[in-house]
Amino acid sequence: MFSIDTSEDGIVRLSGILDSSQAETAGSVFRSVTKSCVIDFRDLEYISSAGLGILLATYKRLSSSGQTIKIVNAKEAVKNILLLARFDILLEIE
């Protein structure tokens, strides 16, 4: 199961598994983000290449207007995926 929600303070919370079957749902939420945001991965169990693609597209769109993305609370397995994909070069990962 996958869920995504945003708060008024700019935090996007993900939980479950973000893979290609959830890409459209996640993509529509991330397309609505227009300012710097924090993405809370506390309850995210796995992210696939489809999920990484959504993050990359969001990063490109936001960075073109000087905005940033910060990822917090990533579990070790998810953090390793981000590091292997070299997302630490683009995003702040805490």
Image (spheres, grey):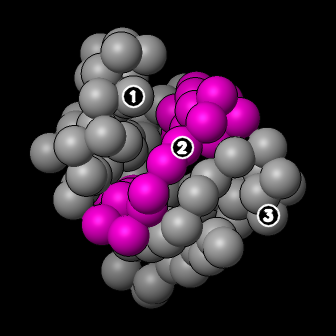
Q: Nearer the viewer, residue 26 or 20?
A: 20
Residue 5, image x and y in percent?
Answer: 56, 79
Comparing labels 3 and 1, the label whose residue is closer to the camera: 1
From the viewer's perspective, is residue 19 above or below residue 59? Answer: below
Which disc is residue 65 wearing? Answer: none
Q: Is residue 19 left or right of residue 38?
A: right
Q: Nearer the viewer, residue 76 or 58?
A: 76
Which disc is residue 81 wearing? Answer: 1
Say which label, 2 or 1, has the lower sequence index: 2
Highlighted range, magenta: 37-62
Q: Is residue 3 left or right of residue 16?
A: right
Q: Residue placed at 54% from the left, 43% from the top?
A: 47
Say which label, 3 or 2, has the lower sequence index: 3
The local secondary structure at tag 3 comes to helix
Query: For residue 84, which quarter of the picture?
Result: top left
Q: Residue placed at 31% from the left, 40% from the top?
A: 77
Q: Residues within 10 Å of mark 2 (few under 14, many from 20)?
A: some
Total marks shown come to 3
Residue 54, image x and y in percent?
Answer: 66, 39
Q: Residue placed at 36% from the left, 42% from the top?
A: 78
Q: Amino acid at mark 3?
A: Thr
| Circles 2, 1 touching at the beta carbon (< 8 Å) | yes
Q: Amino acid at mark 1?
A: Ile
Residue 17, image x and y in percent?
Answer: 59, 58
Residue under label 3? 25
Query: For residue 94, which quarter of the picture?
Result: top left
Residue under label 2? 47
Q: Amino acid at mark 2?
A: Ile
Q: Is residue 73 a member of the stretch shown in magenta?
A: no
Comparing labels 3 and 2, the label whose residue is closer to the camera: 2
